[in-house]
Image (cartoon, helix red, strand yellow):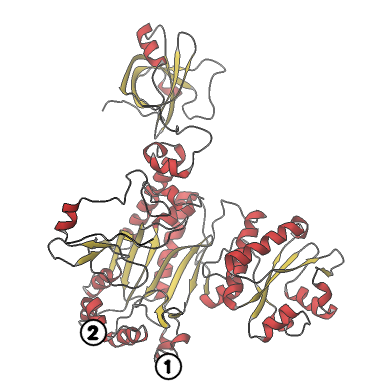
Amino acid sequence: MLRTHNCGQLRKSDVGTEVTLCGWVESKRDHGGAVFIDLRDRYGITQVVIGPPEADKTLIDQAGHVPAESVILIRGKVSDRLEGKTNEKLPTGEIEVRSEHFEILNAAATPPFTPGQAELPGEDLRLKYRFLDLRRTEMQRAMVLRSRIVKIMRDYFAQHDFIDVETPILGRSTPEGARDYLVPSRVHPGQFYALPQSPQLYKQILMVAGFDRYVQVAKCFRDEDLRADRQPEFTQLDLEMSFVDADDIMSLIDGLVAATAKEVLGKDISLPLPRMTYEEAMRRFGSDAPDLRFGMEIVDVTDVAKKTEFRVFRGTADAGKFVRGINVRDAADKYSRRQIDELTSWVQNDFGAKGLAWFRVEEDGSLWSPIAKNFDAEHLAEIKEKLDGQPNDLLMFLADTWDVTCRGLSGLRKRMAVELELFSPNDLNCSWVTEFPMFERDEESDRYVAMHHPFTAPLADDLPRLKDQPEKCHAQAYDLVINGSEAGGGTIRIHDPGVQQQVFDLLGIDEETAKDRFGFLLDALKYGAPPHGGIALGVDRWVMLFAGLENIREVIAFPKTQKASDLMTEAPGEVDGQQLEELHLRTIKAKN
């Protein structure tokens, strides 16, 4: 080893010890005859002094001109810092190393930014020079946290008799859900592998094969439009179990959540985690991943709206649509008319709402609003009672379809909770949403699509509805929600070939197409398939949530941009013609 200690290791008890340190030059200060360098590695920072009598003038001069972010080696003796010069912010702040030997291992060019600078550059620059960005203390903490969480996961499942099985990266394209990333085959002209969107089919095969507890930290790929919490390639903790029901799997993950929260955050989580059905989540919070760190539940006032003379409310209710609202506690004096107008424009532009109605609860308990004159006192009292309005509360309403009121009021809940600081960044709220609809209607293709995937089992009571009332079928599906983000999702699978074909029929997948796409799974189900189910936990998102961050790119070493490009390596890129010829491919220029 070139070094005897790392830069975060030395303490007052090491004074007098001869040490060798290696690291990066965080900063340097020339104090006339002595150069002070803050030497950094991923473990911390140690102050190094190059000056007489330990070092000669040549070394002092060399140290004074070493560029920031250069890699250096120093050898010297640990000393106490001078009285009044200690740094209580650093674990190494009571000591310094007085260097007897100084060596530049690699002199750095002038960097476009330095890891220690106070103001971060733009994200594009950070991603272009990710090797510099990853030197930042915050980024290194995130990577260390990621490593800890993955280890906690692996250890937890090892203790519960799971075996780790790696599944293929090159597989068969089974188009359902997001687009596949395709890989052309050189030895099979005109044919393609697909990168896995998940190990779904393979882990079901493993259950048929008798491996009743499988787990894997799996790399997955989806060609979809990106957001702050989405990546084209992502990592999930994937598991499958045989001879279980949904309660078994949720209970197992409850234990993982509690173990992770305790070890990473020092928090005790009460188990079992709370559960609510999909229908309850949409009714109360407008989202299938509700943030439960604050209240502001959605209240339906459609029945009152039918009795009013306010045309917007009455017309919406008479058309079979909904009038729903939230009570923003003690917020009436925190939002001006201009700010409410901004919120109105926001729900119109982002969620397609027609407008935003609101009332302020006055000190005397009455409701005031520019639209209040359109309501009888009796109806205002009913609205106030339904939302439990108290003085200085702000009552906000959307009148529209179920979907628009859900999305719009859910968005308002989240935005106003942030603006009003209704929760702490350190809060951790975990819950389950269960019994999702089996299918949703795709308006563009005018057909049913699977809400989760086509191998999801319906609730036992809903099996008779598969044929004639598929829209009323609920799935044995469950999502883990942490702080309003989906942190994992799973289902109990179909293990009966007949039921599987019924589902394929509903999805417009005929027997020939099913055999072509999923024939190996259908064959496996005929040869003694056990009841089985599983879940996939988003590792990237878990790390983001446990780190209290909002952007998933902050917890991935080498992420892609929102346009799915890698600015550092400049991927994707063009390939030469010979490679394309070997793959029997040619490119076609896109039309403008």
Tag 1, which secondary structure? Answer: loop
Crowding at mark 2 (Cα within 10 Å: few <14, some 14-19, many 20+): few
Q: CA distance from mark 1 to mark 2?
A: 23 Å
* Residue depth check, mark 1 versus mark 2: number of the one nearer the observer: 2
**Residue 141 visible to the viewer:** no
Residue 140: percent from left, percent from top: 41, 40
Residue 18: percent from left, percent from top: 34, 18
Circle 2 sits on which residue?
Answer: 512
* Depth check, front residue: 101 or 345: 345
Q: Residue furthest right?
A: 364
Crowding at mark 1 (Cα within 10 Å: few <14, some 14-19, many 20+): few
When the figure is inspected, residue 193 is found, relative to residue 37, above or below; the finding is: below
Residue 367: percent from left, percent from top: 82, 70
Type of the residue with mark 1? Asp
Question: Which quadrant would the N terminus be assigned to in this image?
Answer: top left
**Residue 339 visible to the viewer:** yes
Circle 1 sits on which residue?
Answer: 468
Residue 255: percent from left, percent from top: 43, 62
Which residue does the image show at 55% across and 15% down from the upper left? 83
Left or right relative to 332: residue 6: left
Instruction: Find residue 51 and report its image quarter.
Output: top left
Image label count: 2
Which residue does the image show at 60% across and 78% down from the upper left? 401
Left or right relative to 116: residue 298: right
Question: Which quadrant would the C terminus be assigned to in this image?
Answer: bottom left
The reply to whether callout 1 and callout 2 are in contact (CB within 8 Å) is no
Tag 2, which secondary structure? Answer: helix
**Pointer 1 or 2: first along the chain:** 1
* Disc number for residue 167: none
Q: Residue furthest left?
A: 187
* Depth check, front residue: 217 or 58: 58
Type of the residue with mark 2? Glu
